[in-house]
Image: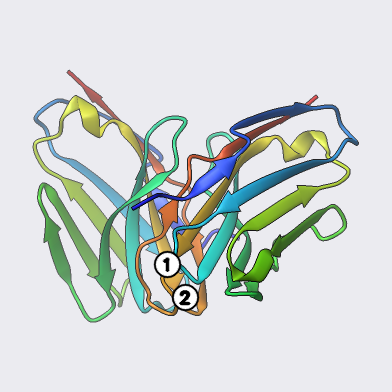
Amino acid sequence: SQQGEEDPQALSIQEGENATMNCSYKTSINNLQWYRQNSGRGLVHLILIRSNEREKHSGRLRVTLDTSKKSSSLLITASRAADTASYFCATGGGYQKVTFGIGTKLQVIP
Amino acid sequence: EAGVAQSPRYKIIEKRQSVAFWCNPISGHATLYWYQQILGQGPKLLIQFQNNGVVDDSQLPKDRFSAERLKGVDSTLKIQPAKLEDSAVYLCASSFDGVPGELFFGEGSRLTVL
């Protein structure tokens, strides 16, 4: 079963615009991670946010976490064509199973 | 540092045949994962190993899928007999022991069942 559910499932924006994608999950978590997957490739880790954190930044990425609403958002600022990929949230880790959402497919148009 | 190695990258078989995928995790990573990713969907966890032990295999179709982790390092995922709906990419990942941190993924093995 999928723990997370990303929204929207597909997003198309112009280069330079910001992209926001959301993730909702069902059970309590210790942390939440975001991954990127380029077409035909494996997933690459982007950022991890712990349950006691509300916001985290990494370069052009900003992640927020609202545990009361069981939701997280990933913001990519000043998007580039190279950001075109699918983005997944994941929960679990350590001695818990790691489950992924259904993903948001982002297309950045040059 | 070498990444997660998987083979083969591509495999085409007829239904009812068998297939095996191999994964070599990053050295020192105690946790190893096998995911099934059907086109257009998110990765679905099939089995998660912690060293030699199984953390979770609740979504592994045990009547046809089997997985083992040899001496807590390499792992093999086998499908026998294959069905059409097994067509997917099989992703292997590894992570450090007991630390809720990032998973490192291989490039995946793409299976087509005809």
- The image quadrant where one finds the C terminus of chain B is top right
Q: Which residue is mark 1?
A: A91
Q: Badge 1: few (under 14), some or many (20 or more) residues near its Cα, within 10 Å?
A: many
Please state if B43 lies on the left or on the right of A36 as rendered.
right
Q: Amino acid at mark 2?
A: Thr
Q: Residue at x 64, y 58 (%)?
A: B75
Q: Chain of mark 2?
A: A
Amino acid type of the residue that numbered disc 1 sits on in the rendered structure: Thr
Q: Is residue A13 visible?
A: no
Question: SS at mark 2?
Answer: loop
Nearest the camera: B89 or B5?
B5
**Disc 2 vs disc 1: Cβ atoms closer than 8 Å?**
yes
Which residue matches tag 2?
Answer: A27
Q: Is residue A34 above or below residue B5?
A: below
Residue B86 placement (x, y as % from top left)? 74, 40
Q: Nearer the viewer, residue A6 or B30?
A: B30
Left or right: A22 in relation to B113: left
Q: Residues within 10 Å of mark 2 (few under 14, many from 20)?
A: few
Look at discs 2 and 1 and give the one toward the viewer: 1
Q: Could you tell me how far apart the alpha carbons at marks 2 and 1 are, in whole angstroms?
A: 9 Å
